[in-house]
Image: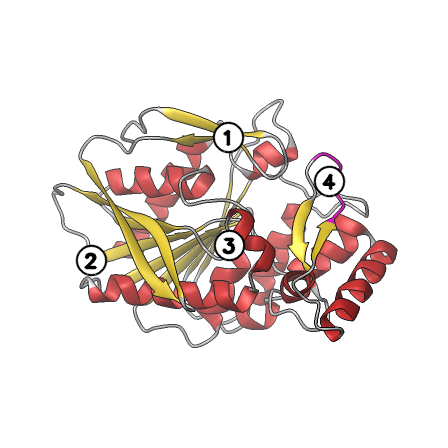
Amino acid sequence: MPGRGMQQKRLGSDGEAMTSPYLPPEGVRTELIEFESCGRRVQGAVFAPVSAARPRDTALIMVHGVEQFWYVGPTMFLATSLAGCGYTTLGYNGAHSGQSFRWSSFEAAVQEVRDAVAFFKQRGFRRVVLMGHSLGTPIVEHYAGDGPDASLSAIAVYGPHISIPAVTRDTLLGPDLYQKFRDECRKLVDEQKGQEIRLLPYRKTAPIITSAETFLSYRDVDTSKAAVEPMIRQIKVPMLVCYDPADNIHGLGAVTMREKIVGDIKAAAISSKRVEVAVVPSKAGNSPVQAHGFIGNEDVVTELTAAWLDRMDA
């Protein structure tokens, strides 16, 4: 694999350091871009090989996790490293990035994927592969199952989810606190105060900050479209599901095992042409959050992904 260059560190929304490539490898050019979606200018970057022995007509789109950005974590190391393998890649700051997440909606995040696909089609790419990490995975899964563009050729999900609402209820908050929190958010929305800020309290050091409307959009077990099992059942393209077995979800309720989520995704993907599961060996000493970001395993994840893409191109 090409070298990924200098590294930078920032604190993730969990308060732990996350390492991410700072510079793309040699032979890759970087272009800052914008595209329109839901009335806002979405900013990101395209990484493209300067030259390639075999030009590829497949573009890769990266969708990051909650409160993250295109330039950190798995979306960044995959975008730059896979560009070094000859693919043109795009990462962008979705509606769910940084402080924007507080007033975002799941529906807007899915629409951004549609507009990102349109962006690459306008540049002449005939095939698009979507890659999502963490919260980016139900966004990608929903798009892929809900009448995607014909250019969609595959999706890959990393540290995946199948139901953000269920994880919030069962693990992050626990059923009792979840019921109380959701009722408060519903009341605020009914009183036309849906933009009022709430603190999702499952992390003592760094709680997620969310408006009442945003909480319901991503996390209401009755109404949220971020419970994507029905959409996964409709996905027809090949899928890669990549995870670290140490990447389990902890909160105030019961632990959710990532392996269980992966099994549920595979069982639901009844229409997909092929589902491949890639298990990343856990790094000794990594916390679950570090395992979620594949800290120290960047090369392994990139190599697994590149090999899968080569099989898709074959």
Q: Nearer the viewer, residue 128 or 73?
A: 73
Under mark 3, the amino acid is: Gly
Name the residue beneath numbered marker 3. 136
Q: How far apart are labels 1 and 3 at the CA level?
A: 19 Å
Question: Image point 73% across, 49% down: which residue?
Answer: 199
Q: Earlier in the sequence, mark 4 or mark 3?
A: 3
Look at the numbered disc 1 and give the secondary structure of its residue: strand
Look at the numbered disc 3 and give the secondary structure of its residue: helix
The circle drawn on residue 30 is none
Name the residue beneath numbered marker 4. 203
Look at the numbered disc 4 and give the secondary structure of its residue: loop
Name the residue beneath numbered marker 2. 57
Left or right of 95? Residue 61 is left
> Is any atom of residue 306 visible in this view?
yes
Q: How far apart are labels 2 and 3 at the CA level?
A: 24 Å
> In the rendered structure, which segment of residues is drawn in magenta?
200-205
- The image's colour scheme reads secondary structure
Under mark 4, the amino acid is: Arg
Say few, some or many: other residues with alpha carbon within 10 Å of mark 3 (under 14 / 14 to 19 / 20 or more): many
Q: Earlier in the sequence, mark 1 or mark 3?
A: 1
CB under 8 Å between discs 2 and 3: no
Say few, some or many: other residues with alpha carbon within 10 Å of mark 4 (under 14 / 14 to 19 / 20 or more): some
Left or right of 279? Residue 81 is left
Say few, some or many: other residues with alpha carbon within 10 Å of mark 2 (under 14 / 14 to 19 / 20 or more): few
Q: How far apart are labels 4 and 2 at the CA level?
A: 43 Å
Say few, some or many: other residues with alpha carbon within 10 Å of mark 1 (under 14 / 14 to 19 / 20 or more): few
Magenta segment includes 203:
yes
